[in-house]
Amino acid sequence: MNTQSPPTPLLQVTDLRVHLHTHQGAVDAVRGIDFTLHRGETLGLVGESGCGKSLTALALMGLLPDAAQASGSILLDGQELVGLDDRALCRLRGNRIGMVFQEPMTALNPVHRIGDQVAEPLRLHRGLGRAAARREALALLERVGIADAARRLDAYPHQFSGGQRQRITIAMALACGPDLLIADEPTTALDVTVQRQILELLAGLVAERGMALILISHDLGVIAQSVARTLVMYGGTVVESGPTRAVFGAMAHPYTQGLFAARPRLGTARVAGERLPTIAGSVPDLADLPAGCPFAGRCPRTMAACHAALPPAVALGASHEARCIRLGEP
């Protein structure tokens, strides 16, 4: 008889909320996010810009702006991160948690050589001397595919292409061997070929190092090919979640359906002048979310009850659920 308990999740997020302090008072911009992530697992956050994906990532990193505050629970290997002081969070960031940002030129210091920037977390968190940190920085740059890395250690960020700069930020995020890597729209500004190379690099590094990955994107194709589980976010809320294949196959929530309907399809004949389908209306302001379903009003199936309260999550299958009071209707 096997009495072994299941492994402890690397990351366990429970009822995560982000409170924004506005001139109208405190409001919840992220409402009740729940998920777990084990080592080696991959999770995607997908949705339109302004739906709360990046705010969720900043909460996980302890990098929320001054006007925002997190509540709920974020457990990293059993250690509570919500309410942790800045000094303790600094010991985790760049060490146990790495982050790759959307625009590498804002993540890289334009006046510092890239070798020094990649070496900085090694010196800060691992206490390496300058020479040892430089050797490891070189190995990291070679691993992420920077050609002729030894010669380019003393180059500056502007001397690299966009794809190369993103590889450098990945090297920085991986320097101390983090348990968790958060990649926030890491391929948005890159062409399709470079985008694929970056995604393949991330997948290879996750498999090689056994770390967990949270990938944030508005691109359904990127999410489909990169992660095993997906959270569809809208209005600061997870409206559908589950295994990526199940979520993308069922498209149970009207918002998920709208995202897929608005996606361009290669190889499909189009009538001249025909416009792609769009989701009517606009994303609600995270500082002024409605009391009910955040998609009410934009949703073609809206009824009065949708405006009253946030719908509970409805189980649809193994680890697959969605928030819609009209689920199951014909």
Image (cartoon, rainbow, N blue to C red):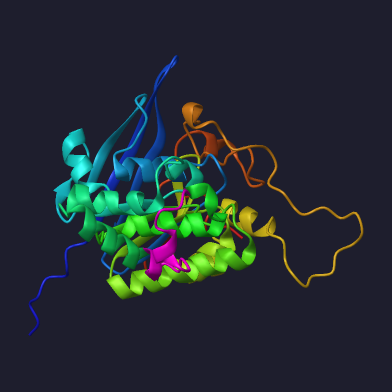
Q: Quadrant of the N terminus?
A: bottom left
Give the residue at x 19% y 45%. Answer: 91
Residue numbers of the magenta segment: 141-156
Q: Residue furthest right?
A: 272
x 45%, y 53%: residue: 155
Count numbered badges in the picture. 0
Q: Residue 258: where, in percent of width, then height?
A: 64, 53
In magenta segment, residue 151: yes
Most extreme residue toward the bottom is 1
Is residue 6 left or right of 247 when viewed as pictured?
Answer: left
- Rendered location of residue 63, percent (x, y): 33, 37
320 in magenta: no
Vertical comparison of 1 with 122: above or below: below
The picture quadrant where one finds residue 49 is top right
Name the one closer to the observer, 252 or 140: 140
Residue at the spot 41% in from the left edge and 67% down from the top edge: 144
Viewport quadrant of the C terminus? bottom right
**Which percent across, then down, holds residue 321?**
42, 59
Vertical arrangement, residue 167 with respect to residue 313, above or below: below
Is 274 displayed left or right of 242 in the figure?
A: right
Given residues 137 and 292, the one toward you in this image is 137
Coordinates of residue 2 in the picture (x, y in percent): 9, 82
Q: Nearer the viewer, residue 135 or 48?
A: 135
Q: Does the image show residue 258?
A: yes
Answer whether residue 314 is visible to the viewer in this image. Answer: no
